[in-house]
Amino acid sequence: MTVTFVTVAIILSVVFIVLMVDARDRVRASEVEKLSVAEKVFTSLEARRQLEQLAAIATVAENPTLKAALDTYFTERAFTGLQDEQEQSLRDTVTVEAEKLATLTGADVLAILDSSGRIFVSAGPLRDRWPAGEHIAIPATSTTFQDIAVLPQGAFRISGSVLGLLDRDIGALVVGTSLDANYARELSNLASADIVITVNGMVAASTAPGEVAADLVNTGTDAADTAALNGEEYAIRTLIRSGRARIYTLASIDAAARTATRDALTALATVAFGAFVLAALGSLWLAQTLTDPIDRLSGEIAMMTAARDLRRPLHPTGTSRELDSLAEAFNELIQGLTVAEADTRAAYLGAIRALAATLDARDPYTAGHSERVSALSVLIGRQMGLDAADLDVLRLGALLHDIGKIGLTDAILRKPGPLTAEEYAELKRHPGQGARILRQVPFLAPHIPIVELHHERPDGRGYPFGLRGDEIPVAARIVHVADAFDAITSARAYRPARGTAEAIAELRRCSGTEFDPVPVEALEVALPLSSTTPEPALQELLGRQLV
């Protein structure tokens, strides 16, 4: 007992001394790290939010009434001149559309810029801060952009999209969020720290004390780890740096050190009292009681990790309520993740099928075409020995292969006779249009090569790029064959359907020029070739492949 008490006393004394000496350094490192983590979390969330906002703005920017009115205004003014009444009417039309879009987006301000970057009209709660004629500098490197705009009436964080009509730009749609006290409070809640927003070297908004914010500007710091502000040491991080605007997050190291030291000393005193009491009574019993169930639980987790099998639940220890609660929470978490993964995949497949069905529904002669092409493609892929992951990409890419035809008019898509040269040229644009649609959805990226290149030919006479042979991805070559087979065996307004054997013969005839021989041979092996094969039997075979 004497040895135990002396040992505990020495340990507590050393801990006390080290705590007093080292507390400030540890708190400083902790606060800097906390801000760093907050910065990373904020950056990640903000990047995702901005991408979603840009996608929404790009969609909103396609408003046809807005584009038409804006184009008419600038065209008429440039070439024929506008009467005051006509000019006001067109400006009112643009203003009404802008007000609708501002209500839809819920932004502080929504503005329509002309092609020179000057404000044409503005809408939203803060539209008075964006007067007509004010110039807004926007990046010219892409159709969508994000920046910070500094106006005489205040600074705004902006997101926007260029308004394009045919092959020219007629202006831009810009959504702005005011860098004011409300925005600072939102960032402060997100970062769990004080926020200071500066514009042109002056404080625009702040959740920190005024003297601290003023000292931050006067010190000229820019992303320094720590600085002395108003007599206290602060950890500092720069969340956003854009042009003349800065957004800082900061936390008082002194305040944290005082709180941490007080809490630590209180805890140390409690620990000291408990240590002296428990050291003599239960050290061995506690060690055995605590370590045995922990060892069992950690051993089960280690086995699950090594086997990469999370389906096996953790068993309760029966001796520790805390560990049993942890095991139960872990099991519920794994179960929830499994259900969420299944739901996500189901939603993923449902969205892809909905896209394909949307296209097929426009033309009764091609109803079910995408599903059949998908089934045929998987049939060919399995015959060629593709693995499960490649078959999944092939299945869904084939479902979406004609999604670009959504942009075609019914006059072309449903024309009962041959297409004119101009109509055919328009039709040939659908692979590129489909690829552009899918690029807006990150999880569809693996399927883009199929959608964009399924009309390429081995002889280089395909479109849109004229690729040859192995330059064309295997999945795109497979979908090309499956697409042609379904087109031959399906009825059209201008011809009846042809049999399976006849379709295979046609594919074989064009093998090596229009079609890759390997998928053609795989399809020939996989399908019954008898011309007397009933159509329902073939449909049943494709149905099984689709499932």
Image (tube, helix red, strand yellow):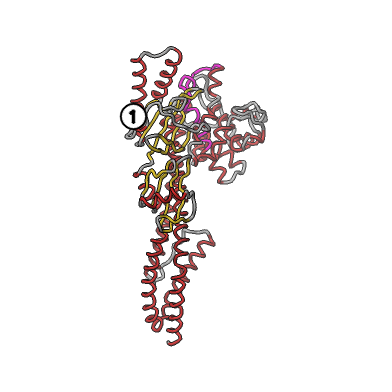
Residue plotted at (50% across, 39% down): 444
**Residue 113 percent coordinates (x, y):** 42, 27
Q: Which residue is mark 1?
A: 99
**Label 1: element kind:** helix
Residue nearest the viewer, comparing 122 with 358: 122
**Identity, as a three-letter code, of the amino acid under mark 1:** Glu
What segment carries the magenta color?
A: 397-420
Viewer-side residue, 497 vs 438 = 438
Relative horizontal placement of residue 383, taking residue 3 as reference (left or right): right
| Residue farthest left in this picture | 125
Q: State which quadrant residue 448 falls in.
A: top right
Is 180 in the magenta?
no
User: Vertical placement of 218 versus 525: above or below?
Assistant: below
Percent x, y for residue 319? 39, 73
Residue at 41 percent across and 21 percent down: it is 68
- Residue 280: % across, % down: 40, 84
Look at the picture and state if 545 lies above or below 191: above
